[in-house]
Structures are given as C-alpha cells and as structure tokens.
Image (cartoon, rainbow, N blue to C red):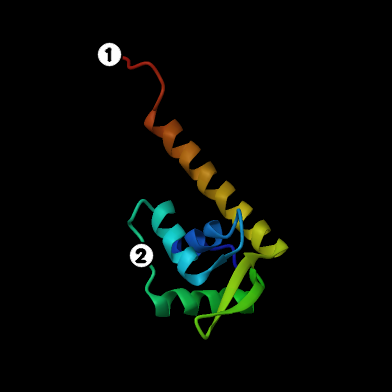
Amino acid sequence: MTDRAMQEPTLLLLTALADEPRHGYAIAREVEVISGGRVKLRTGTLYGALERLLQQGLIEVHSEEVVDSRLRRTYTLTSPGRTVLAGEAERIAATAREATRRLGVGKAATA
C-alpha cells in the first residue's frame, strides 16, 4: 500500500474481515452494515477487490468448501493487512480529532 488514503470500499472490506473470517456474501453484507447501508458492493466489484487484496498480501484464503456444487472461499486478514488497517484507522481518527478541535466541538460557546 502507498501513503495515500485508502479508498472507502477497501477500508470497509478490510474492516469487515478484522474480527473474523468471512465468505464473499457475508463480506458484502457486513460492508453494508458497517457503512450504514451507504455502500453496497456488487458481486464483480467485491470479487475484483478481493483478488486485488489477495495479490497485495492484505488478505488470504482462510478456507475453501463446496456448497451447493460451488466453491466457497472464506477470507481473512493477514498480519500485513491488520497493520495497514490499523494505520488507516489511526489516520482517520487523527483527522477526526483535528476536525473536532477546529470546530470547537465540546467547548463552551462564547458570546
């Protein structure tokens, strides 16, 4: 990964895998929940992103099983994936803290 900000769908996808391994459909549902329904990943977008993240070493296949004659892969974060996600979470939190400070949120209003 570069020092650039991570795209939101990637951030949400990695976040969906942060607490437990999930298969594609479960990842898509979790992304929808995490984003409050704002982000709905289409199948092609989801699997394209998963393939890219596999190639980057941020996620890996946790298990594979055949369900209804179809291969179902379960994905999980790798150690580098956790590091990248933690760094991105800290970057976002630092930006939110600065925005809150500059807005004066929580300070007593002065007349």
Q: Is residue 16 left or right of residue 87?
A: left
User: What residue type is disc 2 on?
Assistant: Lys
Classify the position of the N terminus by image quarter.
bottom right
Residue 58 is situated, as x and y percent measured from the top left of the image, at 64, 68
Tell which tag, 2 or 1, sits nearer the viewer: 2
Residue extending furthest right? 79
In the displayed structure, 16 sits above or below 55; it is above
The answer, for residue 6, to whether it is visible in the render is: no
Judging from the image, what secondary structure is the residue with disc 1 in? loop
Q: Secondary structure at mark 2?
A: loop
- Residue shown at the point (49%, 44%) measured from the top left: 95
Image point (54%, 56%), residue name: 15
Mark 2 sits on what residue? 40
Across and down, in percent, residue 56 comes to 63, 75
Question: Within 10 angstroms of label 1, few (less than 14), some, or many (20 or more) residues?
Answer: few
Going from N to C along the chain, the mark reached first, 2 or 1, is: 2
Residue that label 1 marks: 111
Q: Callout 2 environment at 10 Å: few (<14), some (14 to 19), or many (20+)?
A: some
* Residue at left offset 45%, top offset 31%: 101
Q: Kindly check if marks 2 and 1 are in contact, taking CB atoms under 8 A apart as contact.
A: no
Quadrant of residue 28 in the image?
Answer: bottom left
Does residue 51 appear anywhere in the picture?
yes
Viewer-nearest residue: 61 or 56? 61
Task: Identify whether 48 is placed above or below 4.
Answer: below
In the rendered image, which quarter is residue 102 located in? top left
Q: Nearer the viewer, residue 72 or 12?
A: 72
